Image (spheres, rainbow, N blue to C red):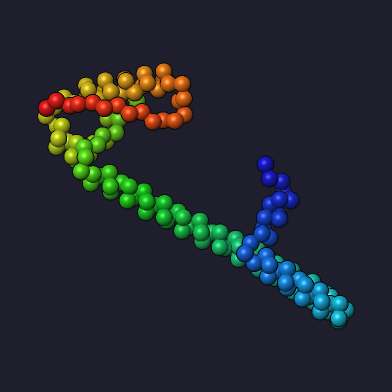
Amino acid sequence: MPSANNKKIEKFISKTKIYLIIIAILIITICILKVKLIPVGIGLYTIIILYAIWSNKKRKAEISEQLKDLTLDVNNTAKTTLINSPFPLVMIETTGNIIWKSEKYVSEFNETNIEDRLNEILKEIKLTIENSENKEKGNINIETKINR
């Protein structure tokens, strides 16, 4: 778990880090040549650091917002792809309740009693998961033939 000191250090780590170091070296050089400018140099450098922290927070917020928008776009694209799929698709809960059917599924299997076969497949999947040694993988392949 990061400590409070690590969080403070992370604020200074950015693409502008090298520029802050160069500015610090230049201000120190000026302050050595003109001792009267030490308070001005400290104040100026403090303002520059505060601006760097503020701009990093602003940049992170903008990136976060763009990622959120991108995620929404990907979700909408995925939904559209599922809805317009040329293959019959159905989403079933582990209890056997059908949550969603694609239009292709309804048109293909509306007249047949496929729900019973889907319940059998679901039971097979449950048994496979329960008997599986590696339950974390989540890949189960079952092929079935539907007679029309």
Q: How many marks?
A: 0
Q: Quadrant of residue 120?
A: top left
Q: What is the x, y in percent for residue 126?
A: 36, 21
Q: What is the x, y in percent for residue 97?
A: 29, 27
Q: Residue furthest right?
A: 35
Q: Residue at position x 21%, y 40% from top?
A: 87
Q: What is the x, y in percent for residue 54?
A: 63, 64
In depth, the one of 139 and 16 nearer the eye is: 139
Q: Quadrant of residue 125?
A: top left
In depth, the one of 121 and 72 nearer the eye is: 121
Q: Residue at position x 68%, y 70% from top?
A: 19
In depth, the one of 42 and 74 nearer the eye is: 74
Q: Residue at position x 67%, y 55% from top?
A: 10
Residue 44 in the figure: left or right of residue 38 = left
Does residue 96 appear in the picture of this structure?
Answer: no
Does residue 112 appear in the picture of this structure?
Answer: yes
| Above or below: residue 70 compared with residue 96 | below
Q: Quadrant of residue 2?
A: top right
Q: What is the x, y in percent for residue 52?
A: 65, 66
| Above or below: residue 17 compared with residue 77 | below
The quadrant of the rendering that contains the C terminus is top left
The quadrant of the rendering that contains the N terminus is top right
| Above or below: residue 2 compared with residue 129 | below
